[in-house]
Image (tube, rainbow, N blue to C red):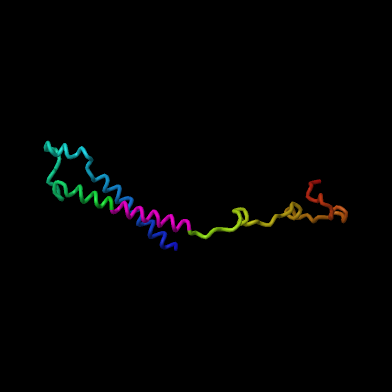
Amino acid sequence: MNWFFSVVLTVHILVALGIVGLVLMQHGKGADMGAAFGSGASGSLFGSSGSANFLSRMTGILAAVFFVTSLALAYVASNKPKTTGSVMQETVQLPTVSPAAATGAESSASPATAGSKAKDIPK
């Protein structure tokens, strides 16, 4: 499933960049007014209105692909296995070292204090 996520994410990013490029290439609604006075190139590669139709169609197709890849990414993200328990249960707990063992001194506590519940109180 990891390779599927990578492929869909790559397609999603490429389609997003394609939509941005196509939208930037399109003329606004006021661009035809400038072409009427000779400042625009009305006889372009696709003809006078062919480029608008082609770019509009391609933008619509890429928008549909973007929508589908968005749904696919949401589906893949929602089907990840759920963890049981909390985040704190999954942490690794290291063994604790007592101060007597860290200094190298042996504990020479009397039998009365060795069994008491207050053995962790410093003297």
Instruction: Identify the residue at horizontal 41%, vertical 62% (top origin).
Output: 4
Q: Tell me the quadrant of the picture where the N terminus can be found.
A: bottom left
Q: Residue at x 24, y 49 (%)?
A: 56
Picture quadrant of residue 2: bottom left
Q: In this view, does 70 lie above or below 37?
A: below
Q: Does the magenta stretch include residue 86?
A: no
The answer to which of 106 and 38 lies nearer the viewer is 38
Note whether 32 is above or below 71 in the view shown. Answer: above
Residue 44 image point, x, y percent: 14, 47
Is 52 on the left-hand or right-hand side of 11?
left
Q: Judge from the rendering whether residue 34 lies leftward or rightward of residue 16; answer left or right.
A: left
Q: Residue at x 23, y 45 (%)?
A: 26
Majority secondary structure of the magenta segment?
helix
In x, y percent, where is residue 116? 84, 52
Region in magenta: 61-78
Q: Where is residue 18 in the image (x, y as percent from the top left)?
A: 29, 51
Residues 89 and 102: in front is 89
Q: Position of 17 compared to 121: left or right?
A: left
| In magenta segment, residue 71 | yes
Q: Quadrant of residue 97?
A: bottom right
93 or 74, which lies in front? Answer: 74
Q: How many marks?
A: 0
Q: Where is residue 83 in the image (x, y as percent from the top left)?
A: 56, 58
Q: Residue at x 62, y 57 (%)?
A: 92
